[in-house]
């Protein structure tokens, strides 16, 4: 009986793995890419039914773009409110948020420094999209100086008419408005309960999240259609090589963060041995690889923090916040997607695009929901950076199930690195603060 039960358990595990959302998306990539390649090989790319097969992917992308922006805006407001509600001294709050922001800025800088020359020199524009995407942009940026670009970015960040900005897909001032709104909004009523505005935002967020999850259930069909559209219209061999450069460039940048930045942070800021610390983090990294979600990995991440001797009070505070706002890997992914899609469409990635992409990636990485497939937020970054969104985005989606897991692993390791620094410098004060709160609660 025990042997039969064990076989059934193994069989169920295999069934669950084969029917997991990531597996279904992979099937969609294979089916869409395979059918598209067959159609392209038989010179059927101009037939009417090509447009019919590409329609589900186009509609899926439109709905996704419609839902992602509200999710990012609400997440930004809630993140700002959460930061204001951090317990303890102002020094602790600034240190915790500052460390998370610092690692993200370093990650984005690495991605730009590595990605711009690497992708720019190795990825060639696809014939199907180079003229379409670059015609009206290169003429405006060739003579732009760094100061002109910087002033233009600040001007573009300043809201003038938020409704009009949103209607024209000028999203950066809309997100900046959300940040200011989150900083200024009243968060509690006199009895300590959330204000009506925050309750409304929470309910709207639940609706948007539910709708987004429903749309993501259609991801296998949508991705299959998008990949099909891309496979029919582009040179598969050239696109495949370009995707290899995209992934290797992203992994090189992530390796710099994982093997240089985080170890330095652990040694200098946390007084830890990176080798032994990383060894205790392996279960969390394995869970991140499998779940592709910082939030789903959080219980395992906390256990790894315990193995590394992090105080429970510090662990709960820092890791819970980090799973929400510390998205180093996600930010690096946004950067590389923008650079790669610009290169493959023949769009000049000038200094203004570098600045816009960096700022957009920083802001949107904070507003990235810690759930699987949150890489859809890249659509907002692409809009802000002025990168055209068309069938070439399907090529990125074809490898999203790989890059998403890599990004999540970096996010989780970044959280665990920061918590070591906070534990060394603020651990005792956090413990005392939590003890004082318990005393007040008992009274």
Image: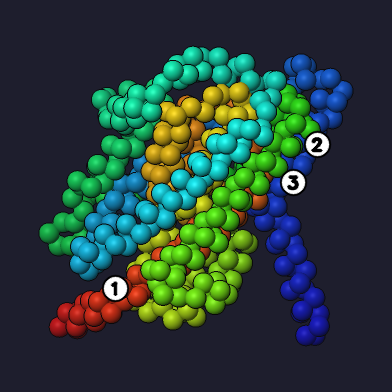
Choose the circle earlier in sequence order: 3 or 2: 3
Residue 299 in view (yes/no)? no
Could you say where residue 13 lies in the image, as x and y percent from the top left? 72, 67
Q: Which residue: 51% across, 64% down?
A: 413
Cα separation, mark 2 vs mark 1, equals 55 Å
Residue 259 in view (yes/no): yes
Q: CA–CA distance between discs 1 and 3? A: 48 Å
Q: Nearer the viewer, mark 2 or mark 1?
A: 1
- Find disc 2 in the rendering and name its residue: 34
Q: Horizontally, is 217 left or right of 411 in the view?
A: right
User: What x and y, as percent, mark residue 334?
Assistant: 51, 42
- Mark 3 crowdedness (10 Å alpha carbons): few <14, some 14-19, many ≥20: some
What is the quadrant of the N terminus in the image? bottom right
Give the residue displayed 71% in from the left and 47% down from the top. Answer: 26
Q: Is residue 430 left or right of residue 320?
A: left
**First along the sequence among labels 2 and 1:** 2
List the residue tagged with mark 1: 426
Q: CA distance from mark 3 to mark 2?
A: 10 Å
Q: For this view, does 16 lie left or right of residue 287?
A: right
Location of residue 295 in the rendering, given as x and y in whole percent from the top left corner: 48, 61
Q: Which mark is residue 3?
A: none
Q: Dot 1 lies on which element? A: helix
Determine the residue positioned at 73% across, 24% down: 233
């Amino acid at each position: 009986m025990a042997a039969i039960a064990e076989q059934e358990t193994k069989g169920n595990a295999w069934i669950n793995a084969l029917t997991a959302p990531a597996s279904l998306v992979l099937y969609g990539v294979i089916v869409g890419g395979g059918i598209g390649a067959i159609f392209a090989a038989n010179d059927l790319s101009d037939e009417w039914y090509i447009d019919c097969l590409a329609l589900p992917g186009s509609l899926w992308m439109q709905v996704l773009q419609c839902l992602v922006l509200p999710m990012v805006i609400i997440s930004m407001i809630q993140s700002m409110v959460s930061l204001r509600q951090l317990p303890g001294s102002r020094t602790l709050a600034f240190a915790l948020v500052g460390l998370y922001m610092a690692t993200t800025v370093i990650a984005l800088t690495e991605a730009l420094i590595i990605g711009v020359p690497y992708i720019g020199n190795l990825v060639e524009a696809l014939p199907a999209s180079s003229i379409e995407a670059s015609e009206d942009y290169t003429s405006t940026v060739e003579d732009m100086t760094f100061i002109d670009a910087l002033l233009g970015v600040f001007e573009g960040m300043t809201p003038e008419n938020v409704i009009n900005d949103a209607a024209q897909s000028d999203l950066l001032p809309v997100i900046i408005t959300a940040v200011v709104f989150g900083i200024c909004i009243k968060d509690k009523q006199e009895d300590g309960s959330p204000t009506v505005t925050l309750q409304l935002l929470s309910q709207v967020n639940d609706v948007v999240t539910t709708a987004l999850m429903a749309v993501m259930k259609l991801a296998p069909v949508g991705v299959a259609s998008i990949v099909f559209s891309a496979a029919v219209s582009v040179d598969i061999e050239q696109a495949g090589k370009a995707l290899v450069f995209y992934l290797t460039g992203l992994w090189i940048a992530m390796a710099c963060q994982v093997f240089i930045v985080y170890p330095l942070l652990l040694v200098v800021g946390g007084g830890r041995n990176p080798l032994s610390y990383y060894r205790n983090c392996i279960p969390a990294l394995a869970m991140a690889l499998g779940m592709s979600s910082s939030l789903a990995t959080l219980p395992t991440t906390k256990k790894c923090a315990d193995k590394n001797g992090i105080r429970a009070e510090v662990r709960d505070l820092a890791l819970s916040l980090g799973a929400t706002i510390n998205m180093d890997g996600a930010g690096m992914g946004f950067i590389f997607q923008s650079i790669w899609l610009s290169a493959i469409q023949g769009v000049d990635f000038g200094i203004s695009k570098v600045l816009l992409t960096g700022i957009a990636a920083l802001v949107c990485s904070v507003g990235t929901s810690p759930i699987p497939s949150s890489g859809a937020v890249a659509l907002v970054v692409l809009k802000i950076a002025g990168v055209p969104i068309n069938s070439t985005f399907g090529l990125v989606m074809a490898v999203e199930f790989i890059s998403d897991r890599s990004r999540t692993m970096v996010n989780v390791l970044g959280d665990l690195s920061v918590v070591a620094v906070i534990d060394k410098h603020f651990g005792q004060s956090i413990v005392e603060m939590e003890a004082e709160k318990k005393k007040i609660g008992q009274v």
